[in-house]
Every structure is written in C-alpha cells, then in structure tokens.
Image (cartoon, rainbow, N blue to C red):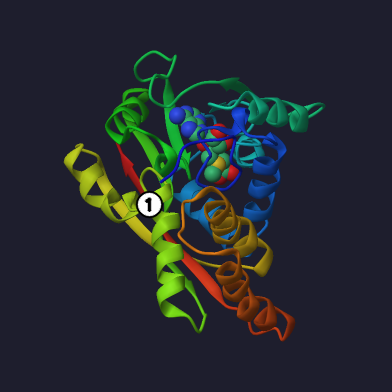
Amino acid sequence: MYANTGLQHSGEFTRVDSAKDSNWFIRFMDLANSLPEYGEVRRALAEGLGPLTGKHVLDIGCGTGDDARELAALVGPEGRVTGIDLSEAMVDEARRRSIGSPLPVEFAVGDVRRLGFADESFDRVRVKLVRQHCPDLDDADSEALRVTRKGGRIAIFDYDFDTLAVNHPDRAATRAAVHAFCDNHRHGWNARSLESRFLDLGVAGVSLKPHTVRMSFAFFQASLGEFVNTAVAHGGLDWTREELASWWRPLEEAEKRSRFFASISGFSLSGTR
Ligand SMILES: C[S@@+](CC[C@H](N)C(=O)[O-])C[C@H]1O[C@@H](n2cnc3c(N)ncnc32)[C@H](O)[C@@H]1O
C-alpha cells in the first residue's frame, strides 16, 4: 500500500472528494453498473430485502443514487428511500440525477461508521460495494444493524478481490497485480467472511449467493488496469515502465481479437435483524 496523493483508482472510494477528479469515480460507477451482471446483483439485493411496498429503505454508500431511485420505484408512493454517502460529490450527483423525479427518494452526506439516525429507523437497509472500502467493519456492520428495525431486512454485496481472474500469459506478474489490487482495498477479502460474520452478529435467516461478473475490457482498464498504472507510477508495484507496457500488450492484443477474458466474483447476503 502507498500513501494517498489524490490518487484515482477503484481502491480509493473513501477519498472521492480529495481525488484529483471526483468525476472519475462517478464515471467508474456508471461503467460498473452498466454491466449486465450488476443488474442481477441489484435484483438479488432487492429480493433479499423482502417485500418493499410502503417500506422505508436506507441505501448506505449510495454513490450516484441510481440504485436508490430503482428502489424508490419499488417502495411506491407510501414508502421512502434515503441514500447516504461519505462523498459530497456523490451526493450532489445523486441529487442532480433526481431533479424533477417524482420518486420518494432523498440523499444526504453520511458515514456508515456513525449514522445520524435513531435506532431502528429503517425497515430495510442495503449496503452495496461499500464495506470493502470501510476502515472499520465492526463499526460499519453494527451501525447498519442498529438502524434496521427488529424484524427488518438487510442486504449486502461486496467483491472478493482475490477472485479476479484474467487470461494472461504472465501468471506471476498477473498474480502480483491482483494481490496488490486486493490488498489496496481495506477489506478486499471481506466478502468471503460475510456469512460467518452476520451469523455471529445474530442475523436470522442468512442467505448467501455468489455472483460472477464478466469484466468488459473497459471495466478491467478502469479497475485493475487503472490500479496497476497508478501503482507502477507511485511505487505500489515494483515494475518498470517497460514491464508495465509488456503486461498490457497481450491484454490489448486479446481485446483486438475479441479474446479478452476477465471476471471477478462477489457475494450477496441477506437476512433479518
Ligand atoms: C464502489 S462505490 C458504490 C456506490 C453504490 N453503492 C453503487 O453500488 O453504485 C462506494 C461508495 O461508498 C462511499 N463510501 C465510502 N466510504 C464510506 C463511508 N464510510 N460511509 C458512507 N459511504 C462511503 C463512496 O463515496 C462511494 O460512493
């Protein structure tokens, strides 16, 4: 790991507002959320939350608010969705995208580690792709459960970054890149412990589903690719610029021949508080 210098790659989602270009993170989420498997993840999370009509839902780390708006259409006029995010830039974008929308959705800046809501404020709580970035998982999980009413539902999705598989002839370099990328997330392995963690926290009816996302070349470039480029430039990976260029070459050639393959797996969990 290396010191923050306003870096822009997908391991830096706790520092969106101090990045050189906060919009990079917005574009990254739009790219990710446009992949077909993300639709499956959103559906699994919505199903895991149980009946939504008339419910008050909290989306923690809501990003651009697209998912919150999708949920707002499901809760109907009697329900409400609140999205909170650590980043002001994300909340501004979420509000901008909601201008003129009749959906019952609102956004606020907030930190999962200290949510500004009373105990049991929400019927449903959802946390997608946030815990992997969060410095303290104990605080994040206990806050998410604290604001869920007893008998309410919680749904979570995170990646396991060491499952990133990419078809590349240089196994050693690719392993080094994937491991460094994983370890650059505060909790790159958290998804593999989701089930045991939430069982230990007393969540009932825990259900865990695996999801594998096939990465488009554009998404791969923006995720592992952007990390590797940044890490080589800032000393996070001990590669020369020539080694970096040689690592990219077979990937670019594969993409040109429509032979590029990469995937990453994550897990969605749901249960009742
Ligand atoms: C990878 S994005 C996911 C956004 C959204 N959930 C989605 O799936 O489209 C992670 C989001 O978590 C936010 N975030 C990071 N740390 C947070 C914290 N401690 N509390 C609340 N949000 C946080 C980031 O600002 C970012 O918008």
Q: Is residue 183 above or below residue 112?
A: below
Residue at 46% across, 71% down:
174
**Which residue corresponds to the image point at 67% horizontal and 28% vertical from the top-left?**
89
Quadrant of res 96: top right
Residue at the image point whose x is 44% and y is 33% from the top: 124
Q: Which residue is mark 1?
A: 183
The residue drawn where x is 53% and y is 39% is 13
Residue 25: x %, y % from top left: 64, 42
User: Where residue 119 sits in the image (x, y, percent)?
Assistant: 34, 16
User: Image check: 33 left or right of 146?
Assistant: right
| Nearer-the-camera pick, 7 or 238 | 238
Q: In the depicted view, which residue is nearer to us: 83 or 85?
A: 85
The answer, for residue 129, to whether it is visible in the render is yes
Residue 65 in the image: x percent, y percent? 64, 35
Q: Does residue 162 show up? A: no
Residue 154 lies, with reference to residue 34, above or below; the image says above
Is 175 located above or below residue 167 in the figure?
above
User: What secondary structure is marked by label 1?
Assistant: helix
Q: Nearer the viewer, residue 25 or 213?
A: 25
Task: State how many labels appear.
Answer: 1
Left or right: residue 247 versus residue 156 is right
**Quarter in which the C terminus is drawn:** top left
Q: Quadrant of residue 20?
A: top right
Q: Amino acid at mark 1?
A: Asp
Crowding near pointer 1: few (<14 within 10 Å), some, many (20+)?
A: some
- The percent position of residue 12, horizontal first and vertical second, equals 52, 41
Would you place residue 9 above or below residue 247 in this image?
Answer: above
**Label 1 beta carbon less than 8 Å to ligand 1:** no
